[in-house]
Structures are given as C-alpha cells and as structure tokens.
Amino acid sequence: MMRMLSCLTALWILVSGLKLDSFAQSEVYRSVETDSMKIAITFDDGPHPTQTKQILDILDAYGVKATFFMVGVNVINYPDAARDVISRGHEVGNHTFSHSIMTHLNEAEVKREMERCEQALAELCDYHPHILRPPQGALNPQVQKCTLEADYSIILWSLDTRDWESKDEEKIVDCVLSSVKSGDIILMHDYIGRKSKTPQALERLLPELLARGFEPVTVRELLYD
Ligand SMILES: [Zn+2]
C-alpha cells in the first residue's frame, strides 16, 4: 500500500511539474482579437541614423504611433536616433543586444542578450521595455521561461511584409493592403543594412490604411486598451 502511495505521489509530482513547466512561459502574441479597427505597425532592427528618422517623419505627418524593436548595439551606435524614437512618443521593444538567434543560446546567454539591450535603453534615456521580439521569431521553452522571469511579453506578428528583401515598394504596399485586418501586428524594418524601400512603402500605406478606417496604434495599446 505504502509503495503504491509513493508511486502515486511520484506520479503526481511528475505531472504537476510538467504542468507548471508548460505554463511557466511568457505570453506570445501574434495578433489580437478586437472589435475595433486597431492594428500595430512595428519596425525591427534599428535604430538607424537616416532611415529611422525618415520613418519617424512619415509617422508624424499622419499622427501615427508605432513600435520599434531595437537592437541594443544599434542603440549604442546611434543614440540620437534611439532618443528621437522615444521622444516622439513611440513604443520601444527589446530585440536583443546583438540580434542573436535566441534558440542557439544557453540560458545565461539568453538573459545577457535581453539585459544588455535593456541596459542600453536605460542608460540612454531611462526607458524600460516590457515587450520582446526574438530575432527571426525564434522561440523555445528556455527563451519563454527567461522572458517570463524578466517580466516580458513576446510579440511576434501576423502580417510579414518581407520589406527587407523587397526592391519594389509596390510589393510591400500590396502585401499589406491585400490582407490587413483588425488586430494585426505588422512586421517591417527600419534597418536592413542597405537602402530600403520601407519609407516609401509606408508613405503610401498610411493614408490608405487610415482611409479604410484602420487605427494604427502601439503594441501596448493594441494589447491592453
Ligand atoms: Zn530582427
């Protein structure tokens, strides 16, 4: 009898342990269910000294706020661009320090990648992000556990413009307009390592999205307001 009880106890510990493990991870958002016309436009991999500014000027012209997932090393290299994004009222998310693929790292390295990006933003302008987008959207339970412990939500996307590979702004515009729906999180880039068509595409997209009744907001507003 005792043996059976101890077996049952061991089984219970195993099952509850598994259950705890499977829940001890950050929330992952790709889009949001909403009755409103809200969408979130997001820019990864910046800041960049010229391209981010171009994008900020276009967003300002239409009174739109967006979310920028910054790479820590770019925050350090281009502090004025990072400061500009924050001072113009946009949201900033953590995109790691060196754009490492987090599923290739051990636990200590995952934490260091997040913390060093955080530190760069904190030292620059006392900004503390609470959303993380892992490079390439690469996730595993270890990354999710670390992000939960650091009190982050993970933000992926529902609409990938693939702007980084596009030589034609028309393609980026079509990609969005042909499928955009309420609650979408749209992935774009403000730094691709060469000249990009993203600013031109954004210039054409924003008036059309607004004319269709969409309300572009930050990720935080899409998730919580
Ligand atoms: Zn990236």
Image (cartoon, grey):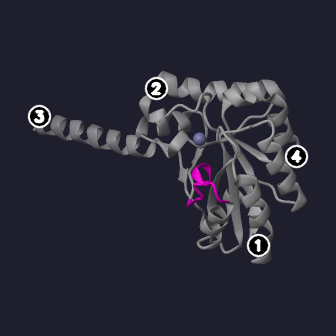
Q: Residues within 10 Å of mark 4 (few under 14, many from 20)?
A: few
Q: Relative to 110, say whether 42 is above or below.
A: below
Q: Quadrant of residue 151?
A: top right
- Magenta segment includes 163: yes
Pointers 1 and 4 in contact (C-beta within 8 Å): no
**Badge 2 amino acid:** Glu
Considering only order in the chain, which callout, 1 or 2, is on the residue closer to the N terminus? 2
Q: Secondary structure at mark 4?
A: loop
Which of marks 4 and 1 precedes in the sequence?
Answer: 4
In the displayed structure, 149 sits above or below 186; it is: above
The residue that label 3 is drawn on is 3
At label 3, counting other C-alpha atoms closer than 10 Å, the crowd grade (few under 14, some 14-19, many 20 or more) is few
Q: Quadrant of ligand 1?
A: top right
Mark closer to the observer (2, 1): 1
What separation in Å lies between label 3 and label 4 (alpha carbons)?
Answer: 66 Å
Q: Is residue 186 left or right of residue 12?
A: right
N-terminal-most mark, 4 or 2: 4
How many numbered callouts?
4
**Residue 59 position by quadrant:** bottom right
- In the image, which is nearer the foreground, mark 3 or mark 4? 4
How crowded is the residue under tag 2: few (<14 C-alpha within 10 Å), some, or many (20+)? some
Using the numbered discs, state the Cα–Cα distance from disc 1 to disc 4 in whole angstroms.
Answer: 23 Å
* First to last magenta residue range: 158-168
- Quadrant containing the C terminus is bottom right
Name the spot of residue 14 as percent of width and height, x first. 27, 38
Pick the residue in front: 196 or 33.
196
Numbered label attached to residue 88? 4
Residue located 70% across and 53% down the image: 197
For the N terminus, the image quarter is top left
Residue assigned mark 2: 107
Instruction: List x then y, in percent, for residue 62.
Output: 87, 62
Q: Give the side of residue 23 with respect to residue 50, left or right.
A: left
